[in-house]
Image (cartoon, helix red, strand yellow):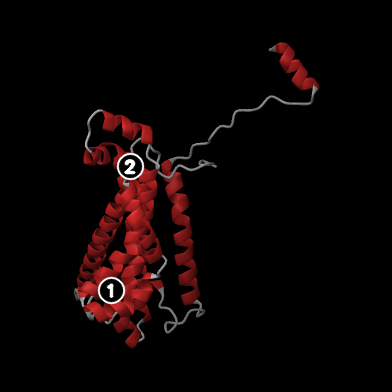
């Protein structure tokens, strides 16, 4: 060992140093994460106070808070939230469920892959917004059209993730379980789905994000209730404060969806550090 070390030194090499990862207190990390939003609100308030942003362009944060109190007080905000959340949840349930089933079928069964995958890949390339006129012809201006649009938008991310995750399942493990007499459904339930769990949660995160985007598009279809209806009314009366409230609500819904998936990751995959990534702790 000594001879080797001396030879390395003679060659101009240095002993490698082990890289240590600095840990940061959770409170400090949380404070750093909130700095960005606080800076944005501060810049917004300063721009409004100095006249850079006039109320007809964008209401000030104080006016937006007043609009929240007004909408909450007369019950409009709670009714709109309830309607929009119901639409998003139904569409996500239908779309993510369909994508999961199709992904397992095409990823696990060769016949399913040969029969379904090419057709699904063709449909996946069609932007879901292009389906709005067709859905209006099929379903009219009804809740079904809105839920179906959200369902279509959320089905393909889950399908791609589920299909890929199932295909990457250890085939030797699957064959071993089959040799012990497990049925196909038992193998899917006990081996394939747990193995594909990281991919499934990634697909769920994408689907939940898309459900909010599709909700915005769906509520633009002559809605008579929901956050989209509030936005349409605010646009007619040039209420930038209400428009800002609705936009912030859409943003918070997306943030809540992402947080829900993170909680699921912690519950279903306790061995996997949430948010860990190469170079974390820098």
Horizontal placement of 165 versus 184: left or right?
right
Residue 28, above or below 226: above
Residue shown at 36% from the left, 70% from the top: 128
Q: Nearer the viewer, residue 273 or 33?
A: 273
The span from disc 1 to disc 2 (Cα, nearest Å) is 31 Å
Nearest to the observer: residue 168 or residue 143: 168
Could one spot residue 264 in this view of the protein?
yes
| The disc label shown at residue 280, or none | none
Decide which of 50, 201 is in the foreground and name it.
Answer: 201
Q: What number is the disc on residue 227?
A: 1
Q: Secondary structure at mark 2?
A: helix
Q: Is residue 172 left or right of residue 32?
A: left
Q: Quadrant of residue 56?
A: bottom left
N-terminal of the pair, mark 1 or mark 2, is: 1
Spot occupied by residue 160 in the image (x, y as percentages of width and height): 38, 54
User: Which circle marks residue 266 in the picture?
Assistant: 2
Q: Crowdedness of circle 1 by 10 Å Cα count: few (<14), some, many (20+)?
A: many
Q: Secondary structure at mark 1?
A: helix
Measured as percent of width and height from the top left, residue 107 is found at 35, 48
Residue 206 placed where, x, y %? 38, 57
User: Which image quadrant for residue 189?
Assistant: top left
The answer to whether residue 202 of the structure is visible from this angle is no
Mark 2 residue crowding within 10 angstroms, few (<14) / some (14–19) / many (20+): few
Q: Quadrant of the N terminus?
A: top right
How far from the left and from the top, in percent, is residue 112? 31, 52
């Amino acid at each position: 060992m000594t001879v080797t070390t001396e030879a390395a030194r003679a060659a101009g090499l240095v002993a490698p140093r082990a890289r240590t990862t600095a840990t940061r207190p959770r409170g400090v990390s949380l404070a750093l994460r909130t700095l960005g939003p606080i800076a944005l609100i501060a810049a917004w308030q300063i721009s409004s106070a100095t006249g850079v942003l006039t109320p007809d362009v964008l209401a000030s944060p104080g006016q937006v808070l007043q609009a929240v109190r007004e909408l909450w007080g007369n019950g409009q905000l709670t009714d709109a939230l309830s309607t929009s959340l119901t639409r998003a949840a139904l569409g996500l349930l239908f779309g993510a469920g369909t994508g999961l089933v199709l992904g397992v079928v095409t990823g696990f069964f060769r016949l399913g892959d040969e029969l379904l995958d090419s057709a699904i890949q063709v449909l996946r390339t069609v932007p879901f917004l292009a389906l709005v006129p067709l859905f209006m012809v099929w379903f009219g201006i009804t809740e079904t059209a809105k839920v179906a649009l959200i369902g279509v938008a959320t089905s393909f991310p889950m399908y791609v993730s589920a299909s890929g995750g199932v295909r990457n399942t250890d085939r030797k493990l699957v064959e071993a379980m089959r040799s012990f007499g497990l049925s196909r459904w038992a193998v899917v339930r006990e081996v394939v789905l747990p193995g594909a769990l990281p991919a499934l949660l990634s697909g769920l995160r994408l689907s939940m994000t898309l459900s909010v985007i599709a909700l915005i598009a769906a509520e633009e279809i002559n809605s008579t209730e929901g956050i989209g209806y509030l936005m349409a009314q605010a646009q007619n009366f040039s209420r930038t404060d209400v428009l800002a409230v609705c936009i912030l609500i859409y943003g918070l819904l997306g943030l809540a969806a992402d947080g829900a998936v993170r909680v699921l990751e912690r519950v279903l995959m306790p061995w996997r550090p949430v948010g860990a990534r190469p170079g974390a702790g820098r």
